[in-house]
Image: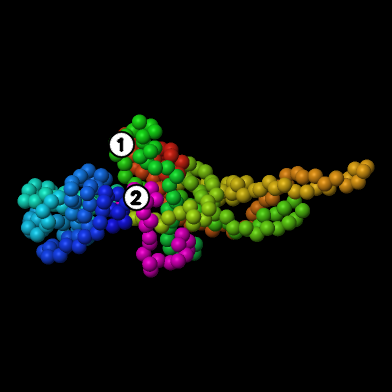
Protein backbone atom coordinates (compact mmCIF):
# COMPACT_ATOMS: atom_id res chain seq x y z
CA UNK A 1 0.00 0.00 0.00
CA UNK A 2 2.80 2.40 0.90
CA UNK A 3 4.56 1.96 -2.43
CA UNK A 4 1.31 2.47 -4.32
CA UNK A 5 0.82 5.77 -2.50
CA UNK A 6 4.33 6.80 -3.62
CA UNK A 7 4.26 5.58 -7.20
CA UNK A 8 0.60 5.61 -8.34
CA UNK A 9 -0.90 8.82 -9.75
CA UNK A 10 -3.74 10.13 -7.60
CA UNK A 11 -4.02 6.94 -5.55
CA UNK A 12 -6.85 6.77 -3.01
CA UNK A 13 -8.09 3.93 -0.84
CA UNK A 14 -11.33 2.28 -1.87
CA UNK A 15 -13.17 -0.67 -0.35
CA UNK A 16 -15.40 -2.70 -2.65
CA UNK A 17 -17.80 -5.20 -1.13
CA UNK A 18 -19.94 -7.94 -2.66
CA UNK A 19 -17.01 -9.55 -4.50
CA UNK A 20 -17.22 -13.36 -4.56
CA UNK A 21 -13.44 -13.75 -4.59
CA UNK A 22 -10.46 -13.78 -2.25
CA UNK A 23 -9.06 -10.73 -4.05
CA UNK A 24 -8.91 -7.71 -1.73
CA UNK A 25 -9.56 -4.17 -2.90
CA UNK A 26 -6.57 -1.86 -2.30
CA UNK A 27 -7.81 1.31 -3.94
CA UNK A 28 -8.11 3.24 -7.16
CA UNK A 29 -5.66 5.37 -9.15
CA UNK A 30 -5.46 7.35 -12.40
CA UNK A 31 -2.32 5.52 -13.54
CA UNK A 32 0.58 3.39 -12.31
CA UNK A 33 3.58 4.14 -14.55
CA UNK A 34 5.69 1.31 -13.05
CA UNK A 35 3.35 -1.22 -14.68
CA UNK A 36 2.61 0.79 -17.82
CA UNK A 37 -1.03 1.22 -16.82
CA UNK A 38 -2.75 4.47 -17.81
CA UNK A 39 -6.52 4.85 -17.56
CA UNK A 40 -9.17 7.17 -16.18
CA UNK A 41 -9.75 4.67 -13.38
CA UNK A 42 -7.60 1.73 -12.35
CA UNK A 43 -9.10 -0.53 -9.70
CA UNK A 44 -6.27 -2.17 -7.76
CA UNK A 45 -6.62 -5.62 -6.18
CA UNK A 46 -4.43 -7.86 -4.05
CA UNK A 47 -4.40 -11.64 -4.40
CA UNK A 48 -2.89 -12.94 -1.11
CA UNK A 49 -0.48 -15.87 -1.10
CA UNK A 50 -1.97 -19.35 -1.22
CA UNK A 51 -1.21 -22.96 -1.99
CA UNK A 52 -2.92 -23.04 -5.39
CA UNK A 53 -2.29 -20.85 -8.45
CA UNK A 54 -4.87 -18.47 -9.90
CA UNK A 55 -6.85 -20.23 -12.64
CA UNK A 56 -8.75 -18.87 -15.62
CA UNK A 57 -12.08 -20.01 -14.16
CA UNK A 58 -11.32 -18.10 -10.93
CA UNK A 59 -10.58 -14.99 -12.98
CA UNK A 60 -13.80 -15.33 -14.97
CA UNK A 61 -15.83 -15.57 -11.74
CA UNK A 62 -14.04 -12.51 -10.36
CA UNK A 63 -14.74 -10.59 -13.57
CA UNK A 64 -18.48 -11.06 -13.12
CA UNK A 65 -18.39 -8.95 -9.94
CA UNK A 66 -15.46 -6.66 -10.74
CA UNK A 67 -16.26 -2.99 -11.43
CA UNK A 68 -16.41 -1.88 -15.04
CA UNK A 69 -13.11 -0.38 -16.09
CA UNK A 70 -9.49 -1.46 -15.83
CA UNK A 71 -8.63 -3.89 -12.98
CA UNK A 72 -5.01 -4.37 -11.88
CA UNK A 73 -4.35 -7.49 -9.79
CA UNK A 74 -1.19 -7.69 -7.68
CA UNK A 75 -0.78 -11.40 -7.07
CA UNK A 76 1.28 -13.22 -4.45
CA UNK A 77 0.00 -16.49 -5.94
CA UNK A 78 1.37 -18.15 -9.04
CA UNK A 79 -0.73 -17.60 -12.17
CA UNK A 80 -1.62 -20.33 -14.65
CA UNK A 81 -0.63 -19.48 -18.26
CA UNK A 82 -4.20 -19.71 -19.61
CA UNK A 83 -5.26 -16.78 -17.40
CA UNK A 84 -3.83 -14.35 -19.93
CA UNK A 85 -6.39 -15.53 -22.53
CA UNK A 86 -9.40 -14.51 -20.41
CA UNK A 87 -11.21 -11.73 -22.29
CA UNK A 88 -14.45 -11.34 -20.36
CA UNK A 89 -13.27 -8.16 -18.59
CA UNK A 90 -10.42 -5.63 -18.72
CA UNK A 91 -7.57 -6.63 -16.40
CA UNK A 92 -3.84 -7.13 -15.92
CA UNK A 93 -2.20 -9.53 -13.45
CA UNK A 94 1.19 -8.66 -11.99
CA UNK A 95 2.83 -11.96 -11.04
CA UNK A 96 4.81 -12.64 -7.81
CA UNK A 97 8.30 -12.43 -9.33
CA UNK A 98 7.59 -8.97 -10.75
CA UNK A 99 6.09 -7.77 -7.46
CA UNK A 100 9.12 -9.06 -5.55
CA UNK A 101 11.45 -7.17 -7.86
CA UNK A 102 9.29 -4.03 -7.62
CA UNK A 103 9.28 -4.09 -3.82
CA UNK A 104 12.93 -5.10 -3.56
CA UNK A 105 14.09 -2.19 -5.71
CA UNK A 106 11.99 0.21 -3.61
CA UNK A 107 13.65 -1.08 -0.43
CA UNK A 108 17.13 -0.78 -1.92
CA UNK A 109 16.41 2.75 -3.14
CA UNK A 110 15.26 3.76 0.34
CA UNK A 111 11.63 4.48 -0.64
CA UNK A 112 10.40 1.65 1.58
CA UNK A 113 11.71 0.34 4.88
CA UNK A 114 11.57 -3.45 5.31
CA UNK A 115 11.09 -4.71 8.86
CA UNK A 116 11.97 -8.03 10.38
CA UNK A 117 9.31 -10.03 12.17
CA UNK A 118 8.55 -8.79 15.66
CA UNK A 119 9.59 -12.04 17.31
CA UNK A 120 13.18 -11.58 16.14
CA UNK A 121 15.76 -10.54 18.70
CA UNK A 122 16.21 -6.85 19.46
CA UNK A 123 19.97 -7.52 19.24
CA UNK A 124 19.63 -7.34 15.49
CA UNK A 125 22.84 -8.01 13.61
CA UNK A 126 24.54 -10.08 16.28
CA UNK A 127 25.95 -13.58 15.77
CA UNK A 128 26.19 -16.18 18.48
CA UNK A 129 29.91 -16.98 18.25
CA UNK A 130 29.70 -20.23 20.23
CA UNK A 131 27.26 -22.04 17.98
CA UNK A 132 27.64 -19.78 14.93
CA UNK A 133 23.88 -19.20 14.63
CA UNK A 134 22.74 -16.00 13.00
CA UNK A 135 20.27 -13.96 15.04
CA UNK A 136 19.60 -11.32 12.40
CA UNK A 137 21.07 -9.20 9.64
CA UNK A 138 21.14 -5.62 8.43
CA UNK A 139 21.27 -4.30 4.89
CA UNK A 140 23.31 -1.15 4.29
CA UNK A 141 21.70 1.86 2.67
CA UNK A 142 22.59 2.13 -1.04
CA UNK A 143 24.73 5.06 -2.15
CA UNK A 144 23.77 4.81 -5.83
CA UNK A 145 20.50 4.37 -7.73
CA UNK A 146 20.61 1.77 -10.48
CA UNK A 147 18.57 3.74 -13.04
CA UNK A 148 20.72 6.86 -12.64
CA UNK A 149 23.83 4.67 -12.87
CA UNK A 150 22.54 3.15 -16.12
CA UNK A 151 21.52 6.53 -17.58
CA UNK A 152 24.98 7.99 -16.99
CA UNK A 153 26.49 5.11 -18.99
CA UNK A 154 23.99 5.05 -21.84
CA UNK A 155 22.51 1.74 -20.68
CA UNK A 156 18.83 2.71 -20.50
CA UNK A 157 16.47 -0.25 -20.52
CA UNK A 158 18.93 -2.82 -19.19
CA UNK A 159 17.47 -5.75 -17.27
CA UNK A 160 18.30 -6.11 -13.57
CA UNK A 161 16.97 -7.61 -10.36
CA UNK A 162 17.78 -6.63 -6.74
CA UNK A 163 20.03 -8.93 -4.72
CA UNK A 164 22.11 -8.72 -1.54
CA UNK A 165 25.88 -9.19 -1.30
CA UNK A 166 27.21 -10.84 1.85
CA UNK A 167 29.69 -8.80 3.91
CA UNK A 168 30.73 -8.38 7.56
CA UNK A 169 30.43 -5.63 10.11
CA UNK A 170 33.06 -5.63 12.86
CA UNK A 171 32.16 -3.96 16.14
CA UNK A 172 35.40 -2.85 17.77
CA UNK A 173 35.50 -1.95 21.45
CA UNK A 174 38.81 -0.76 22.82
CA UNK A 175 41.09 2.11 23.80
CA UNK A 176 42.84 4.76 21.80
CA UNK A 177 46.17 5.50 23.44
CA UNK A 178 47.77 8.93 23.23
CA UNK A 179 51.52 9.75 23.04
CA UNK A 180 51.74 10.44 26.77
CA UNK A 181 49.82 7.37 27.90
CA UNK A 182 46.37 8.97 27.71
CA UNK A 183 43.50 6.49 27.33
CA UNK A 184 40.22 7.09 25.54
CA UNK A 185 37.66 4.24 25.41
CA UNK A 186 35.77 4.03 22.11
CA UNK A 187 33.47 1.88 20.00
CA UNK A 188 33.55 1.64 16.20
CA UNK A 189 31.68 -0.20 13.44
CA UNK A 190 33.83 -1.30 10.49
CA UNK A 191 32.53 -2.70 7.21
CA UNK A 192 34.57 -5.53 5.72
CA UNK A 193 33.57 -5.56 2.05
CA UNK A 194 34.91 -8.74 0.38
CA UNK A 195 33.73 -7.54 -3.04
CA UNK A 196 35.85 -4.38 -3.17
CA UNK A 197 38.24 -5.91 -0.58
CA UNK A 198 38.14 -2.71 1.44
CA UNK A 199 37.54 -1.69 5.04
CA UNK A 200 35.56 1.43 5.95
CA UNK A 201 33.96 2.98 9.01
CA UNK A 202 30.16 2.94 9.37
CA UNK A 203 27.89 5.32 11.25
CA UNK A 204 26.17 2.58 13.23
CA UNK A 205 22.52 1.85 12.49
CA UNK A 206 22.10 5.20 10.69
CA UNK A 207 23.85 3.51 7.74
CA UNK A 208 21.48 0.55 7.75
CA UNK A 209 18.00 -0.71 7.02
CA UNK A 210 16.27 -3.93 7.99
CA UNK A 211 16.97 -6.59 5.40
CA UNK A 212 14.28 -7.53 2.87
CA UNK A 213 13.89 -11.13 1.80
CA UNK A 214 16.05 -11.11 -1.33
CA UNK A 215 18.48 -13.50 -2.95
CA UNK A 216 21.89 -13.42 -1.25
CA UNK A 217 25.18 -13.83 -3.11
CA UNK A 218 28.29 -14.98 -1.24
CA UNK A 219 31.79 -13.86 -2.26
CA UNK A 220 34.60 -16.30 -2.97
CA UNK A 221 36.24 -17.36 0.30
CA UNK A 222 39.64 -15.91 -0.57
CA UNK A 223 38.17 -12.40 -0.76
CA UNK A 224 37.78 -12.19 3.02
CA UNK A 225 40.66 -10.59 4.94
CA UNK A 226 42.93 -13.09 6.76
CA UNK A 227 42.57 -12.59 10.52
CA UNK A 228 46.03 -11.19 11.21
CA UNK A 229 45.92 -8.77 8.29
CA UNK A 230 42.37 -7.73 9.24
CA UNK A 231 43.44 -6.66 12.73
CA UNK A 232 46.45 -4.76 11.39
CA UNK A 233 44.40 -2.94 8.72
CA UNK A 234 41.63 -2.05 11.18
CA UNK A 235 44.23 -0.64 13.58
CA UNK A 236 45.60 1.55 10.78
CA UNK A 237 42.09 2.70 9.87
CA UNK A 238 41.29 3.72 13.46
CA UNK A 239 44.54 5.54 14.10
CA UNK A 240 44.05 9.28 14.64
CA UNK A 241 46.40 12.24 14.34
CA UNK A 242 45.43 15.02 16.70
CA UNK A 243 46.83 18.43 17.40
CA UNK A 244 48.60 18.54 20.74
CA UNK A 245 50.47 21.17 22.71
CA UNK A 246 54.19 20.70 23.27
CA UNK A 247 56.61 22.79 25.27
CA UNK A 248 59.99 23.86 23.91
CA UNK A 249 62.51 25.69 26.14
CA UNK A 250 64.39 28.62 24.67
CA UNK A 251 66.65 31.36 26.04
CA UNK A 252 63.64 33.59 26.54
CA UNK A 253 61.64 30.94 28.37
CA UNK A 254 59.10 28.22 27.46
CA UNK A 255 57.43 28.39 24.06
CA UNK A 256 54.17 26.49 23.53
CA UNK A 257 53.63 25.08 20.04
CA UNK A 258 51.10 22.84 18.27
CA UNK A 259 52.07 19.59 16.60
CA UNK A 260 50.30 16.44 15.36
CA UNK A 261 50.31 13.49 17.73
CA UNK A 262 49.37 9.87 17.01
CA UNK A 263 46.57 8.16 18.90
CA UNK A 264 46.61 4.40 18.22
CA UNK A 265 44.38 1.46 19.03
CA UNK A 266 45.56 -0.78 21.86
CA UNK A 267 44.98 -3.90 19.77
CA UNK A 268 45.94 -6.40 22.48
CA UNK A 269 43.05 -5.34 24.72
CA UNK A 270 40.49 -4.58 22.00
CA UNK A 271 37.54 -6.85 21.20
CA UNK A 272 36.52 -7.62 17.60
CA UNK A 273 32.89 -8.79 17.27
CA UNK A 274 31.73 -9.93 13.78
CA UNK A 275 28.19 -9.55 12.48
CA UNK A 276 26.71 -10.45 9.13
CA UNK A 277 25.63 -7.48 7.05
CA UNK A 278 24.32 -7.20 3.50
CA UNK A 279 25.28 -4.78 0.74
CA UNK A 280 22.46 -3.79 -1.66
CA UNK A 281 23.13 -4.69 -5.29
CA UNK A 282 21.50 -5.47 -8.62
CA UNK A 283 22.13 -8.48 -10.81
CA UNK A 284 22.76 -7.23 -14.35
CA UNK A 285 21.54 -9.61 -17.04
CA UNK A 286 24.57 -9.29 -19.31
CA UNK A 287 26.96 -11.83 -20.80
CA UNK A 288 28.62 -12.72 -18.52
CA UNK A 289 26.21 -11.87 -15.69
CA UNK A 290 27.51 -9.18 -13.31
CA UNK A 291 26.36 -7.58 -10.06
CA UNK A 292 26.21 -3.82 -9.59
CA UNK A 293 27.49 -2.92 -6.12
CA UNK A 294 25.01 -0.56 -4.45
CA UNK A 295 27.68 1.31 -2.47
CA UNK A 296 30.65 1.82 -4.79
CA UNK A 297 28.84 1.63 -8.17
CA UNK A 298 31.24 -0.96 -9.60
CA UNK A 299 30.44 -4.20 -11.46
CA UNK A 300 31.67 -7.52 -10.03
CA UNK A 301 31.73 -11.13 -11.20
CA UNK A 302 30.21 -13.84 -9.05
| Magenta-tinted stretch | 103-128
In terms of sequence position, does the residue under pointer 2 or pointer 1 come before the other? 2
Q: In which quadrant is the N terminus drawn? A: bottom left
Picture residue at 37% right of the left edge, 41% below the top: 146
- Disc 2 to disc 1, how far (Cα)? 17 Å
Picture residue at 14% right of the left edge, 56% below the top: 54
- Find out whether the residues at labels 2 and 1 contact each other: C-beta distance under 8 Å: no
| Colour treatment of the image | rainbow
Number of disc labels: 2
Mark 1, Cα crowd under 10 Å, few <14 / some 14-19 / many 20+, is few
Which percent across, then down, holds residue 204? 52, 56
Q: Dot 2 corresponds to which residue?
A: 106
Mark 2, Cα crowd under 10 Å, few <14 / some 14-19 / many 20+, is some
Which percent across, then down, holds residue 198? 52, 43
Looking at the rendering, which quadrant does residue 119 occupy?
Answer: bottom left
Q: In which quadrant is the C terminus drawn? A: top left
Picture residue at 47% right of the left edge, 65% below the top: 123
Picture residue at 34% right of the left edge, 48% below the top: 105
Name the disc covering residue 158, or none: 1
SS of the residue at dot 1?
Answer: loop
Q: Is residue 220 magenta?
A: no
SS of the residue at dot 2?
Answer: helix
In this rendered view, identify the residue nearer to me: 134 or 171.
Answer: 171
In this rendered view, identify the residue nearer to me: 128 or 25.
Answer: 25
Q: Farthest top residue?
A: 154
Which percent across, then down, holds residue 127? 47, 61
Amino acid sequence: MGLLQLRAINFRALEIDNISSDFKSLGIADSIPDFGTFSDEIFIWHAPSGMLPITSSELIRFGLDAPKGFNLILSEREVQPDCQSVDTFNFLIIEPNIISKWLGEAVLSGELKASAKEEESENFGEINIQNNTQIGIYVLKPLIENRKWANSRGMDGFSSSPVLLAARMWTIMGDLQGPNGEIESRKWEILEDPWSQNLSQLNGTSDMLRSPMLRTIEPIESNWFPTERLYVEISKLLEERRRGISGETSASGTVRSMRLQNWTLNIDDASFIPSKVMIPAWQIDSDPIKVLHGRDGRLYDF
